[in-house]
Image (tube, rainbow, N blue to C red):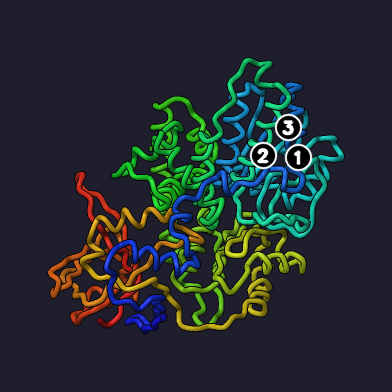
């Protein structure tokens, strides 16, 4: 039986289970999984790749792709890998690089510079590699003109992608779980996962053809490649259920073995050696993305492919510096974008010719989180060409809207996912675009809802044992959200601002004599921050539990999302 509460910041809480307390942690875990529609706790914990991964050839054109790449390997053809600049594109590129390097196959790679070349496959890159077999990763599905050029010039192209597509262009092979004629139920795979499937297929065909025996070469251990698949799966916000969950569980195990020197360098930068989905999403991912946004994605490719630990450490530090620069740019752009917000509108659309194109996606995400509205942010260059990025809410499939804007000639190109998309637009078309959005973005507005699994007493929340039990049903992210709890009967013993805009708290349950450390991120100056810094009466809090480490000592920290009377 669920319960609803109106919070002190005007949000509605829905608590799935009203049980006031649990006798043991096993019962708590059972309730959390039941809320996700899962009854068999042990089967959920024991998920494996063996039981979830399909034969690669079930995907349309995968066999064609594998056969063409195998033919190139055996014939000693040169191969070019053309990727995208984000974590998924970089990881996909490095997966093929590592595999081809192991096989001693001649290859080259290229990732476009976002500032100079934009996104995806280009005719210039095809010209550069006209005497190669070209494999595009995390791009190419909507590159109709470019693929037509490749055909005219007799350039063989294999596309391995995962972006939405309405029709299938001509190429040697188009491997994409979102093909309109694809009937396999594996649509929520990132490009790196599709590349891994392709490598599994190539490896099998090479084995069957006697390649390894003839070369006196041991087969590669493909489990060593799963760290990159996990990295991309989490950072591209794929649902962490089924095969994706198996990829991430095994990929994190591979990260702990520290075979990839670049990932090892990223781990070493952290205050703790623990690797979780949060570590990957909020530490590794932003640093890897920072290279493609502010400099060149080549830095990230080199980080994830280097065999030199000193080089790995230097690049990791450079990426950390770029990420800090990105954070400062982000802060300034958000401040300027907020000035353009129409509070009465169902969406946010902000634009400027002073903004860095590599940051607009992050800003759109922050605005969406803060205002709970579809958010579109556009950076305009000196030629009047705008590059936009969108982040949406569950009620609005933003990729459908961007595609319609393209069909009506408002944006010059665009595409993406239901919750995130990108587009190009001429500056003089932006007013028409905003009017178009007013007509297209309509949804039933309500109080923002926050969902919690159940109540949790402060003494159980403060126990380290709870994190051990909770981690067994991870990793957490899209599709398998962090368990959220409501902890009642608390008072704010201490509250202060830390960092640039976070509120750090000490919460106390006086009756039980238990204290709990908590933090509310980016809440200074918000309704939530105002309450936390001034409220004196008993409260209950909604949020997630996190393991923190300071000077080698571990403790629980509550990540506070909202507060209600107590």
- Determine the CA span between mark 1 and mark 2: 9 Å
The 10 Å Cα crowd at callout 3, few under 14, some 14 to 19, many 20 or more, is: many
- Determine the residue positioned at 56% across, 41% down: 90
Viewed as shown, does residue 204 lie left or right of 394? right
Q: Is residue 496 visible?
A: no
Residue 268: quarter of image: top left
Q: Is residue 137 visible?
A: yes
User: Which residue is under mark 1?
Assistant: 63
The image shows residue 494 at horizontal and vertical percentages of 17, 69
Establish if 416 lies above or below 349. Answer: above
- Determine the residue positioned at 19% across, 66% down: 506
The image shows residue 36 at horizontal and vertical percentages of 48, 67
User: Which residue is under mark 3?
Assistant: 69
Establish if 559 lies above or below 448. Answer: above
User: Which residue is under mark 2?
Assistant: 198
Viewed as shown, does residue 133 lie left or right of 49? right
The image shows residue 130 at horizontal and vertical percentages of 77, 32
- Determine the residue positioned at 57% across, 35% down: 94
Viewed as shown, does residue 518 lie left or right of 561? left
Mark 2: secondary structure: helix
Viewed as shown, does residue 557 lie left or right of 6? left
Residue 223 numbered mark, or none: none
- Determine the CA span between mark 1 and mark 3: 10 Å
- Determine the residue positioned at 41% across, 76% down: 16
Query: Mark 3 and 2 residues: CB-CB less than 8 Å, in contact?
Result: yes
């Amino acid at each position: 039986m669920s319960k609803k509460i109106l919070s002190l910041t005007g949000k509605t809480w829905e608590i799935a289970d009203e049980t006031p307390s649990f006798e043991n942690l096993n019962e708590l875990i059972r309730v959390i999984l039941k809320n996700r529609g899962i009854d068999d706790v042990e089967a959920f914990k024991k998920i494996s790749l063996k039981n979830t991964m399909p034969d690669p050839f079930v995907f349309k054109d995968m066999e064609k792709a594998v056969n063409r790449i195998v033919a190139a390997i055996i014939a000693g053809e040169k191969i070019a890998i053309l990727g995208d600049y984000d974590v998924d594109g970089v990881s996909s590129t490095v997966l093929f690089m590592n595999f081809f390097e192991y096989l001693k196959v001649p290859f080259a790679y290229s990732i476009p510079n976002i500032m100079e070349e934009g996104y995806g496959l280009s005719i210039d890159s095809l010209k550069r590699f006209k005497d190669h077999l070209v494999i595009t990763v995390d791009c190419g599905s909507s590159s109709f003109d470019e693929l037509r050029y490749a055909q005219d010039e007799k350039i063989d192209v294999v596309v391995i992608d995962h972006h939405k597509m309405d029709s299938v262009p001509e190429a040697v092979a188009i491997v994409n779980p979102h093909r309109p004629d694809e009937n396999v139920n594996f649509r929520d795979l990132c490009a790196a996962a599709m590349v891994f499937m392709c490598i599994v297929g190539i490896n099998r065909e090479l084995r069957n053809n006697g390649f390894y025996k003839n070369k006196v070469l041991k087969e590669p251990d493909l489990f060593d490649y799963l760290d990159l698949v996990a990295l991309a799966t989490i950072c591209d916000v794929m649902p962490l259920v089924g095969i994706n969950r198996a990829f991430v569980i095994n990929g994190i195990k591979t990260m702990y073995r520290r075979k990839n020197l670049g990932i090892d360098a990223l781990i070493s930068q952290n205050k703790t050696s623990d690797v979780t989905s949060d570590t990957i999403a909020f530490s590794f991912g932003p640093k890897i993305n920072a290279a493609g946004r502010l400099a060149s994605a080549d830095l990230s490719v080199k980080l994830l492919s280097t065999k030199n630990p000193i080089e790995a450490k230097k690049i990791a530090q450079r990426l950390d510096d770029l990420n800090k620069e990105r954070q400062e740019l982000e802060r300034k752009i958000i401040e300027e974008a907020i000035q353009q917000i129409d509070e009465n509108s169902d969406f946010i659309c902000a634009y400027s010719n002073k903004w860095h194109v590599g940051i607009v996606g992050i800003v759109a995400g922050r605005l969406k989180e803060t205002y709970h509205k579809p958010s579109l942010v556009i950076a305009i260059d000196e030629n009047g060409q705008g590059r936009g990025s969108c982040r949406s809410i569950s009620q609005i499939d933003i990729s459908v809207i961007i595609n319609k804007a393209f069909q009506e000639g408002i944006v010059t190109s665009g595409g993406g996912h239901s919750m995130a998309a990108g587009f190009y637009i001429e500056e003089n078309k932006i007013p028409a675009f905003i009017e178009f959005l007013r007509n297209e973005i309509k949804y039933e507005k309500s109080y923002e809802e926050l969902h919690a699994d159940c109540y949790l007493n402060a003494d159980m929340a403060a126990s380290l044992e709870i994190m051990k039990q909770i981690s067994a049903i991870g990793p957490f992210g899209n599709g398998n959200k962090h368990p959220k709890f409501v902890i009642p009967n608390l008072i704010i013993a201490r509250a202060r601002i830390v960092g640039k805009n976070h509120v750090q708290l000490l919460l106390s349950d006086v009756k039980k004599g238990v204290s709990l450390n908590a933090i509310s991120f980016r809440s200074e100056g918000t309704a939530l921050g105002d309450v936390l810094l001034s409220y004196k009466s008993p409260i209950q809090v909604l949020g997630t539990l996190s393991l923190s480490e300071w000077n080698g000592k571990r403790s629980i920290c509550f990540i506070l999302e909202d507060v209600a009377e107590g």
